[in-house]
Image (tube, grey):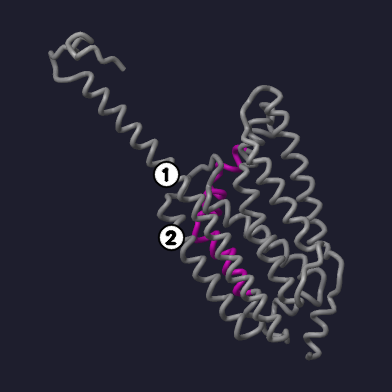
Amino acid sequence: MTGRYTALAAVGPGLSPGQLLTALAAWAAVAGYLTAAARLRRRGDRWPWRRDLSFASGGLALAAAPAVPLPGGPFTAHMAQHVLAGMAAPLLLVLARPVTLALRTLPPGSTRRGLLAAVRSRPAAWLVFPPLAALLDVGGLWVLYRTGLFAASHHEPLPHSLVHLHVVAAGLLFSFAVCAPEPLRHRWGLAWRGTTLLLTGAAHAVLAKSLYAVPPPGTGFGTADLRTGSQIMYYGGDLVELALAAALAVQWYAATGRARSRAGRSTGAAGAAGPAGARRPSPAESGGASR
């Protein structure tokens, strides 16, 4: 065990200010979401229960990841926290469509107009441009683990808090950009989102493989700890990316169904109109079939 490793492991139990802030914000968001959903149902509107479950699970994972002691060495525990707080929790939160819920429950007024304007603003449209969101997400991870930032952030509370907040925020942004479930100003096509997800998954996997062989600069994790943590990053990332791909596939299936329905209605209307001067056959002439 090297001196640097000892210092890194001696960060010790307890939450950093950033982790504590994230946990409190997660609990507050879950309480607000469930209250809003209940209010929506009381007035007779439909809101799927699965979204409540998704948001509550995401908030619980986000709050618990840094607080609950995880088995394994320090790098293994860190990677489990990374997958939970930076990948799984953001996806679960985004799939619950919190912005749509807020827009449906907020009364008409400046708050609702402001939220809608922010979601549909030009900066928001570019911020959720899939390649940019991917660069902020997985690009930030490469900077974190392939420079001295990872070791430095564990010696100072402020950098540690900022890194944690960035990982969570970038995970939320990337999940939001890929799933795009909210009323955005511009929804990027499935080709943009699918290609970005594929390339991001590859970059994440390469980073995990590199960590399997070479630890982050300035650290001295044990070999078994380093390899277990890298495997959690690799396979955990695969699972979350498969879930994102499934969300995209559902959207593609729904969009294809809507397109076929529109085409069917258009063809039916054209067929019903028929050529100029033609008359629509009576039910008796058509064999009594009616639609």
Disc nearer the start of the sequence (2/1): 2
Q: Is residue 192 left or right of residue 170?
A: left
- Name the foreground residue: 172 vs 247: 247
Mark 2 neighbour class, 10 Å CA radius: few under 14, some 14 to 19, many 20 or more = some
**Residue at point 68%, 27% (across, down):** 41
**Residue 208 pos. (x, y %):** 59, 75
Mark 1 neighbour class, 10 Å CA radius: few under 14, some 14 to 19, many 20 or more = few
Residue 196's place in the image compared with 115, above or below, is below
Residue 131 magenta-drawn? Answer: yes
Q: Is residue 222 left or right of residue 191?
A: right
- Residue extending furthest toward the front: 287
**Residue 54 pos. (x, y %):** 65, 46
Residue 291's place in the image compared with 235, above or below, is above
**Residue 46 pos. (x, y %):** 61, 28
Where, by quadrant of the figure, is residue 222 drawn? Answer: bottom right
Q: Amino acid at mark 2?
A: Thr
User: For mark 1, what is the residue?
Assistant: 253
